[in-house]
Amino acid sequence: MARLDIDTLVKRYGDFYAVRDVSLSVADGEFLVLLGPSGCGKTTTLRMVAGFIEPTSGHVRLAGGDVTLLPPWKRNTGMVFQSYALFPHLTVAQNVAFGLEMRKLPKADIDRRVDEALALVRLGGFGARLPRQLSGGQQQRVALARALAIRPDVLLLDEPLSNLDAKLRQEVRVEIRELQRQLGLTTVMVTHDQEEALTMADRLVVMNEGTVHQVGTQRDLYERPADRFVAGFVGRTTFLAGTVEGGRFRTEGGLSLAIAEGAPGKAALSLRPERLEIGAGPLGLDNDLPGTVEFVSYLGAQIDIHVRLSPADRLVAQIANRGGVAPEVGQTVHVGWRAPAGQVFKE
């Protein structure tokens, strides 16, 4: 059963469409992530669900009820903002209690729920502190506790980890995911961080220019992208420009490549770095091309090898770092891949 239904939501500012005909359903207990570049409409969509932005048209339904015209405080949603939005003059406990007080719960119930929420985010004993006495990660947990204290039908997360450093961000995203699973909370999160989205989501929604390009699992989006934008945004890929002629792909640099499928005409060939093989000599694959190493990027667990195949064509191959000798700049190598590894997108 869907806990949240978004039906053909539109948000228009004059002639500009921030969101155009977005429809989504989020199941009870599901963790859905809206992923896309800055300005793609994902935060506007989330804020329309929360009630902070009024849709131009469309409907939002929570737990079966239409809440499209209700103000935020009459929707049972918990929101965690990018900036945390904690009241600096209130203690941690007072910040967490704020939403409960607005709902006019008895003081004993408020105190109990505050203690429960702080315990969930491992901040028991921090109730008397002020936000400025906490680290960024602790402030983020207070904001999460405040959202959880009201026992929301849906938890909404707006880039909640963007203000944390890289190491802390990795730790906190695991904590949020584990807590969401523990509580069975229906959750919608907005992010532009691919790794964050791939780590946390049950399903992902890729958005661009106010529209949904594809909805699916991590494997769906990575292995079977719906279009060139999704292929380029989810994971890493190299695009070769060219045309499909006679069942083969001819690059702008004049290379003739074997492909599994592709409609005739102008197109782009997408090749994932980890699907390419690289060696000192011929590899015996469907596509096997000599090239010159132009750049080597050492990334710890893997090494990226940038290879020039023609004046107009360059690929990036990724190899595992097993302690051996990597190709060097200026070296001639062979790059190869099987035909199904390449995905053709019409231009």
Image: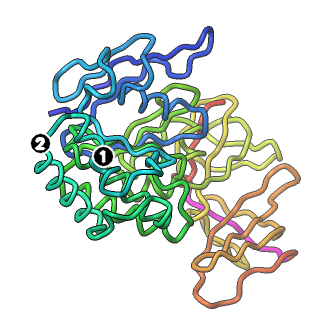
Q: Is residue 334 left or right of residue 171?
A: right
Secondary element type, mark 1: helix
The image quarter containing residue 117 is: bottom left
Q: Position of residue 116 (x, y in %)?
A: 18, 59
Amino acid carrying label 2: it is Pro
Secondary element type, mark 2: loop
Q: Position of residue 83 (x, y in %)?
A: 51, 47
- Per the rendering, the mark at residue 31 is none
Q: Position of residue 133 (x, y in %)?
A: 47, 66
Which residue occupies 41% across, 33% down?
A: 46
Which residue occupies 34% across, 53% down?
A: 144
Residue 335 painted magenta = yes
Q: How many numbered badges does the structure rendering display?
A: 2
Q: Position of residue 292 (x, y in %)?
A: 83, 68
Q: Is residue 340 above or below residue 156?
A: below
Q: Is residue 44 above or below residue 36?
A: above
For label 1, the residue is 147
Which residue occupies 55% across, 22% down?
A: 18
Q: Which residues are magenta?
A: 331-338
For label 2, the residue is 106
